[in-house]
Image (tube, helix red, strand yellow):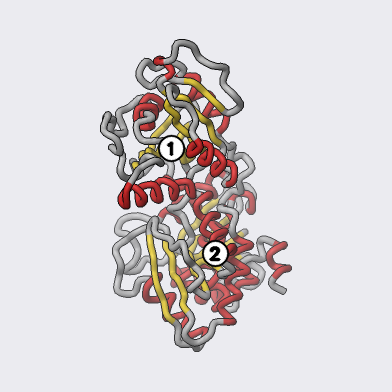
Amino acid sequence: MSLNATPTADRLHIGFFGRRNAGKSSLLNAVVGQDLAVVSDVLGTTTDPVYKAMELLPIGPVVVIDTPGLDDVGSLGEKRIKKAKQVLNKTDLAVLVVDAQIGLSSMEREVLELFSQKAIPHLCVFNKSDLLESLPEPGPGEFYASALTGANIYELKERLASLAKSDDSKLRIVGDLIKPSDFVVLVVPIDKAAPKGRLILPQQQTIRDILEADAVAVVVKEFELRSLLNDLGRKPALVITDSQVFAKVAADTPPDVPLTSFSILFARHKGILEGVTQGALALDTLKDGQKVLIAEGCTHHRQCDDIGTVKLPRWISYYSSKKLEFSSVSGGDFPEDLSIYSLIVHCGGCMLNEREVRFRLKCAQDQEVPMTNFGTAIAHMQGILKRSVSVFPHLAVELE
C-alpha cells in the first residue's frame, strides 16, 4: 500500500469464512478480480489469515481477509480455527461461504449465530451454484454465486456494498471541534523515537482533518510552542500535543486555550474515550505487586527510551509509588485472559480499526479490568486530564 493510500485502520474489513474447500479463496478472488488467495483442492490450503488492502468497487477502500477453514482438524487445526475466529474481532462485514451442493451444517449455523452475537453485518453465500440443477429461493441474508463461472459475482459485490456500514455518523478526528479559518497548533516532538523523514500516522491524519475543515494547521516542536503562541497574533482554537510532552505543553499553553492530545482525539474517534477516561482513574488505586499490561496495536523497532516498554512503566511506578509488574504486547497480540492484570494501558490504536479497538475495551470491561490509553493515562498522571477532555463537556462533568 502506498504512502498516499487510505490507512488500513480506516478501511472496511471484509472477512471470508467457511469450511475447507467451500471455495472461500476462489470466491474472494472472484469478488476482488485478482488472484489474491491461493486456491487448491487440497484441504486446509489457507493456514493463516491473509490480509490485503485494496480498492473494491462499489465499496471503496477495504481490507479483504481470507481465513483458514472452520472445520480444520487436529491440534494444529484447532489453532487455525482459533486464528480464524479471532479475525471476527476486526471484521466489519462477514461473508460465510457455503458449498451449495452440501448446504448449511450445524457448524455453519453456529457461525451465523456468532456473526449475529457480535453484531457483524453478514451474508451467507452458497458457492458452486453452477453445480446445482436449479437454484432454490434464497432466504434472508442468503445469496447464490459461482466463483468458477462468475455467475452473480457482480450482484454479490452490489449486495456487499449495500451491507457496508456507512461512516457518515462517525466522529471526525478534530474537524467537528473547529471552524473554517481557525488556527490549530500541533505540538510534535522530534526525538530519537520519531520515524525518520516523516510524521507518524495520527499526526498526518489530524493535519488532513484540519485542512478538510478549512482551518489552519500550525506544526511546532515543544520547545518553540511558547514563542509561537506569543507571535501568532491571535488565540488558537485548539492545541493538540503528543502525550509524551503533555506537561511542558500544558505549562506553556494559556489556561483559556483548549488543550488535548492526539491519543485522546483518536480515542474519541474510535468511540472509546469515555471508557479509557474512566480507566485512567484506576492509576490511583494500584497496589504493590499488581500487574499492568502495556498494549500497542503496531509493531516497531524499540528505542532505548521507548514509551511503551520504558517511559510508561517508569512514569506509572513513580506516580503510584508502588512496586508493580509490567508486561507488554504489540501488534495483533492481545491476551484472552486479562484477569491477571489490574490495569491495561493501550496505545492510541491508530493502526487498529474501530471494531478491534472497541473489542479490546469490551474484553477488559467484561473481565472487570480497567483499561485506559497512553494519552489519558499521561494526562491524569500530570493532573491535566480534566483540562484535556474539556473540549468534550460531558466527559469533563464525569471527572468532577
Kind of element beneath mark 2: helix
Within the image, what quadrant is residue 98 found in?
top left
Q: Which residue is mark 1?
A: 17
Left or right of 154 on screen, residue 380:
right
- Does 340 appear above or below 6? below
Residue 324, image x and y in percent?
45, 83
- Does 249 appear above or below 129? below
Within the image, what quadrant is residue 383 found in?
bottom right
> In this rendering, does residue 234 appear at all?
no
**Residue in the image at 56% along x and 66% along y:** 367
Q: Earlier in the sequence, mark 1 or mark 2?
A: 1
**Residue in the image at 54% along x and 44% along y:** 114
Tell me, for residue 341, which label it has, or none.
Answer: none
Left or right of 85 on screen, residue 359:
right
How busy is the neighbourhood of tag 1: few (under 14 within 10 Å), some, or many (20 plus)?
many
Within the image, what quadrant is residue 307 found in?
bottom left
Quadrant the C terminus occupies: bottom right
> In this rendering, does residue 297 appear at all?
yes
Amino acid marked by disc 1 = Phe
Amino acid marked by disc 2 = Ala
**Residue in the image at 43% along x and 18% along y:** 129
